[in-house]
Every structure is written in C-alpha cells, then in structure tokens.
C-alpha cells in the first residue's frame, strides 16, 4: 500500500512540474514610460517573439530600434494603435530595423523627424 501511495505521489508531483504553456504577452498600454517600455521589449525580444502594442496613442520623444531577427511587432489595428513621434527630440527615424524576418502590422507611425520606419541591412521585412 505504501509503495502505491509513493508511486501516485511521485506521478502527481511530476505532472505538476511538467511543461506549461507560455504566458500570453501583455500588450503595451499608452503611458508616460511607453517609449522606454517599448524599447526595452525590443531589446529583450528573442527570435520568434511577438511584441504586442495595445490600442491608443503612444507619444514618443526618442526613436526606437530593433536588432533581433524574426520578431513581430503587432498593434491592435492601423486605426487603433498610433505611434506618434511629434515630440521626437533630434533627427532620425521612428523605428530603425536592422534585423531580418521582421513583421510589422496593425499600427500607424506618425510625425517622425526622419523616416517613419527605416530598414538598414535587413531582409524579409
């Protein structure tokens, strides 16, 4: 009887420690720290990641850059997620992409000092 109880306990513990589904990414929301928050997500991204940007108008003062291959940046819709660079300090693009296999969808770029989105040395965008 003890060996059956021990075996069941071990199996239950093993099942509890098994692989779990990855957490669904939380969409970035408009805030006063959105510029730094989105850039941090772009820096921390891994190939295959999707960076979700929620609905709303995001005010940026600095350009953004992505250097990781195979990343998707996904907004809530071109009329719902607005990335505004009206307050951008200095010249430059809104988003500089220097990585391959990038998908950009569901958002609008506005008022950057330079190109809205600039691709440099990148393929398959």
Image (cartoon, helix red, strand yellow):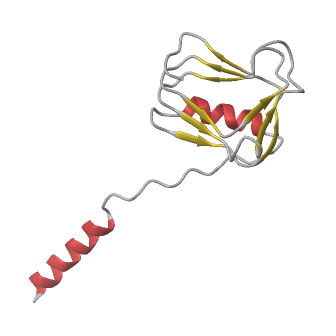
Q: What x and y, as percent, mark residue 23?
A: 50, 55
- Where on the picture, by quarter, is residue 109? top right
**Above or below for 51 versus 87:** below
Report the number of discs: 0
Q: Quarter-wise, where is residue 93 in the image?
A: top right
The quarter of the picture where residue 106 lies is: top right
**Residue 89 placement, left or right of 27:** right
**Farthest-out residue, right:** 87
Which residue appears farthest toward the front when viewing the image?
A: 79
Q: Which of 84/1 is in front?
A: 84
The residue at the far bottom in this view is: 1
Residue 39 x, y percent position in the rendering: 67, 31
Q: Is residue 71 left or right of residue 12?
A: right
Q: Residue 44 location, x and y as percent?
A: 55, 33
User: Viewer-proximal residue, 113 or 14?
Assistant: 113
Position of the C terminus, as image quadrant, is top right
Q: Residue at x 77, y 43 (%)?
A: 79
Residue at image coords 82%, 12%: 91
Q: Position of residue 54 (x, y in %)?
A: 70, 48
Q: Quadrant of the N terminus?
A: bottom left
For the point 75% across and 34% down, the residue is: 108
In the image, farthest residue toward the top: 121
Q: Vertically, is 93 above or below 72?
A: above
């Amino acid at each position: 009887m003890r060996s059956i109880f021990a075996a069941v306990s071990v199996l239950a513990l093993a099942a509890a420690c098994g692989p779990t589904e990855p957490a669904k990414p939380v969409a970035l929301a408009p805030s006063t720290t959105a510029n730094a928050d989105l850039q941090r997500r772009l820096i921390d991204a891994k190939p295959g990641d999707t960076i979700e940007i929620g609905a709303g108008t995001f005010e940026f003062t600095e350009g953004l850059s992505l250097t990781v291959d195979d990343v998707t940046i996904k907004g809530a819709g071109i009329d719902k997620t607005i990335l505004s660079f009206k307050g951008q300090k200095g010249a430059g693009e809104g988003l500089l992409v220097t990585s391959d296999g990038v998908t950009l969808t569901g958002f609008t770029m506005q008022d950057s000092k330079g190109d809205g989105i600039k691709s440099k040395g990148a393929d398959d965008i």
